[in-house]
Amino acid sequence: MKPSTDQLDEIREIYNLPLTTLIFRAQHIHQRFQDPAGVQLCTLQSIKTGKCPENCTYCPQSAHYDTPVEAEPLMDIEDIVGKAKEAKAGGASRFCMGAAWRDVRDGPQFDLVLKTVNEVSSLGLEVCCTMGMLREDQAVKLKEAGCAVYNHNLDTSREYYPEIITTRTYDDRLNTLQNVRSAGLEVCAGGILGMGETVEDRVKLLAELAALDPQPESVPINALVPVPGTPLENADPVTSFEFVRTVATARILMPGSIVRLSAGRLEMNEETQALCFLAGANSIFLGDKLLTTPNPEQSDDFQLLAKLGLHPLDPEEARRFHRANRGSEPAAVS
Ligand code: SAM
Ligand code: DTB
Ligand code: SF4
């Protein structure tokens, strides 16, 4: 359902609060609904890279653009399981597998993915998949194989979406999220900042995410990683304070969700990342590579967590919080 004018007014008012008040509000909610010192550690693995038929203007994996990404076919199960073991040994609790597909197709490749999901989940890792659009029966198969979460981002506002992608619609995205939810998988849905969007687009994106019922269990907030060859390679970067405002507003609107400080951390100094944690972010991607672009060194991240006195979040604890608080009303502005 399209967010109402009143909802947008309220969210805009939150976003534009004095930064001190905004962070105070966000931290108040964070202390109440989340483990205040816990940070979820996730690892990303691209299991099928590049040559994607979609034309997402931010994405180095789109076949529409000439980027430095080397295409790779679907990885072998043993190799993926090896990466998952490394991720677990490195301290991650969630393993997220990404495939540069427009949509999930039934057939031998999906069967291999299901087998892989099964093996990775039996290592005791939470499995997340992000593979494009999928039907409810496919989501059910993923769930039965041991997948816990499906990531599918709305990326930006409904209005700005056609400027970013034309090969699918906002409603296609929402339909997949509905299929994921109906299958009983957890929903991971967020967006990207720094694509030339306005504050109003961010407000609308947050309104769409917060209006999902139930709200997503995870909300990744990405800063665009500009990649040469993509149409957005020269986009003006989002400022750190705008990024922090978006994180804080997400925290206030979605008290029970994990808010992930996702792509773009390499460009942020430690102080900016600490501000994001203060604003309510409580998850990061661990490991020196996202899907195809670099991410901070794992040892630097552990050092940062230690300096801030933060600790890896226990997944069970996080789920308990979410169950207790899902559907919480957005906090009043005044
Ligand atoms: N193909 C699937 C899809 O689009 O849902 C899964 C993989 S796709 C790479 C996952 C998400 O990564 C996208 O929805 C987008 O939000 C994010 N992403 C892709 N390229 C990015 C970039 N250059 N900077 C920041 N985030 C990016
Ligand atoms: C999300 O919101 N961010 C991750 C994950 N979900 C799949 C992906 C970030 C990709 C950044 C660009 C790249 O490394 O290719
Ligand atoms: Fe394909 Fe996903 Fe990249 Fe879009 S974001 S081009 S769908 S891999």
Image: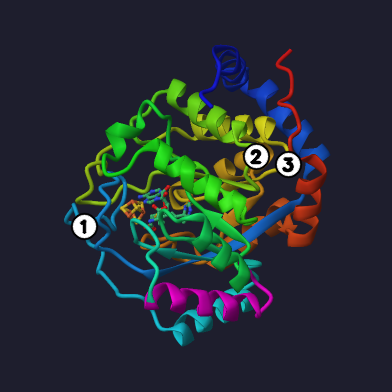
Residue placed farthest to the bottom in the image? 78
Per the rendering, the mark at residue 249 is: none
Residue 218 position within the rendered picture, expressed as x and y whole percent measured from the top left: 61, 48
Q: Say which element carries label 3.
A: loop
Per the rendering, the mark at residue 256 is: 3
Q: What's under tag 1, amino acid-wise?
A: Ala
Q: Is residue 103 visible?
A: yes
Q: Quadrant of the C terminus?
A: top right
Q: Is the residue at mark 1 in contact range of ligand 3, meaning its CB lies under 8 Å from it? A: yes
The residue shown at (65%, 39%) is 215
Q: How far apart are the alpha carbons under marks 1 and 3?
A: 37 Å
The residue shown at (56%, 35%) is 209
Q: Which residue is mark 1?
A: 63
The residue shown at (78%, 61%) is 316
Q: Which residues are magenta?
A: 108-127
Examine the structure image and report whether residue 118 is included in the region drawn in magenta: yes
Q: Quadrant of the N terminus?
A: top right
Q: What's under tag 3, amino acid-wise?
A: Gly
Residue 186 position within the rendered picture, expressed as x and y whole percent measured from the top left: 63, 54
Q: Main secondary structure of the magenta part?
A: helix
Per the rendering, the mark at residue 215 is: 2
**Pointer 2 with pointer 3, Cβ within 8 A:** yes
**Pointer 1 with pointer 2, Cβ within 8 A:** no
Q: Say which element carries label 2.
A: loop
Q: How far apart are the alpha carbons under marks 1 and 2?
A: 33 Å
Q: How far apart are the alpha carbons under marks 2 and 3?
A: 8 Å
Position of residue 246 relative to residue 118, above or below, is above
